[in-house]
Amino acid sequence: MRHSLTSLGFLLVFAVMTPIHAQRVDYPALQITTPDGGTSLLLGTMHQGDDRVPLPLPVVVEQALRLVVASDLLARPLPPRAGGPPPDLSPQISLGSILDEGEKATLRTRVQCHLPQNSTPSDIEVVTSFALSGPIRVTADFAALCPTPGQPSVESWLKKAAAARGVPLDSLEGTQDSSMQRAALPDRIFISNVRRILSSQGSDLFARLTTFLNTGDYEGICGLVRENFASSADWDLFEQRLVSERNAHWMPVLERYLEEGQAVIMVGASHLCGENGLPALLSKKGYQIESIRIPAVGRPPTP
């Protein structure tokens, strides 16, 4: 019964999260209930600001005891993960060595759109040079599609809302842990994914992913990502290193936050599908998982 009173306010917030009108803007979420009644909220995200993806209202974190993300330099540090996969020690190549001139031009545009608006030409040149010359396992994220101007990602939006309300930020792993998992992947996986994102396929793929996200279809997200890998073997390795192994590693920390109750947790949507996804792992341990819709806005007001 230790959660019965502390969870009451959180449950009342959830009570207003079910849409009353069909036209209401909302966002998919999973309500997690512990065996003794504690409740928390689990959100799947896309890590990028896009005006096709609504932003949960700040009320979502209003009565949260903590906001939890996968990893963040600003979160309270966790001890480094013991063991983990060995790094791929094959020579690491750079984007500059494998991209053609058209792809390099697109990459330069992507780098610029992700930098602050007040960045100087010198700043842009320094970052672009690193994006082209650094090891691909580090620089691949520079190829990400440009966000909608003025539209934050769900993560940055809710982190800002939490900070404004004094809600502490915690994480499921240290940043060094996710880097270690990435380092275990061969360059070929990053090469094929970067080329796809830099092509017209990248925009089409992201549009389809946002549709799945907005309907809470996490299995659809993982299926679409799987289809776009160069081979099933590459997907299996990627899913093992960056999804399944991390999910298993997160579980003890995640359960601690869930047992405390009233946590709002954000992870990449691909962590929520399949037999090794967080919902499946939590269900096996007796947690109740309920799909709900939470209130959201299409464009950001001030949090």
Image (cartoon, grey):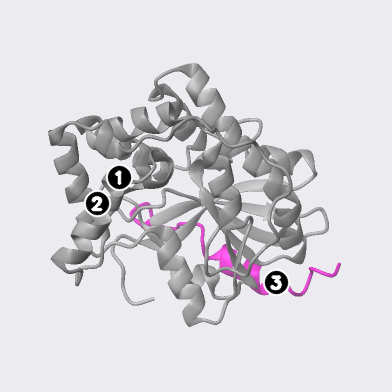
Residue behind mark 3: 8
Residue behind mark 1: 133
- Mark closer to the chain start, 3 or 1: 3
- Main SS category, magenta section: loop
Judge by depth and name the residue closer to the eye, 8 or 70.
70
Where does the magenta region start and end?
Answer: 1-25
Of the two numbered discs 2 and 3 in the rendering, the one whose residue sits closer to the viewer: 2
Can residue 218 be seen in this snapshot? yes
Crowding at mark 1 (Cα within 10 Å: few <14, some 14-19, many 20+):
some
Task: State yes or no: discs 3 and 1 in contact (Cβ < 8 Å).
Answer: no
Marks 2 and 1, how far apart at CA = 6 Å
Q: How many marks?
A: 3
Classify the position of the C terminus by image quarter. bottom left
Judge by depth and name the residue closer to the eye, 223 or 95.
95
Q: Is residue 282 found left or right of 264 in the rendered image?
A: right
Residue kind at label 1, given as amino acid type: Ser
Residue behind mark 2: 129
Among the 4 quarters of the image, the one containing residue 136: top left
Circle 1 sits in a helix, a strand or a loop, which is it?
Answer: helix
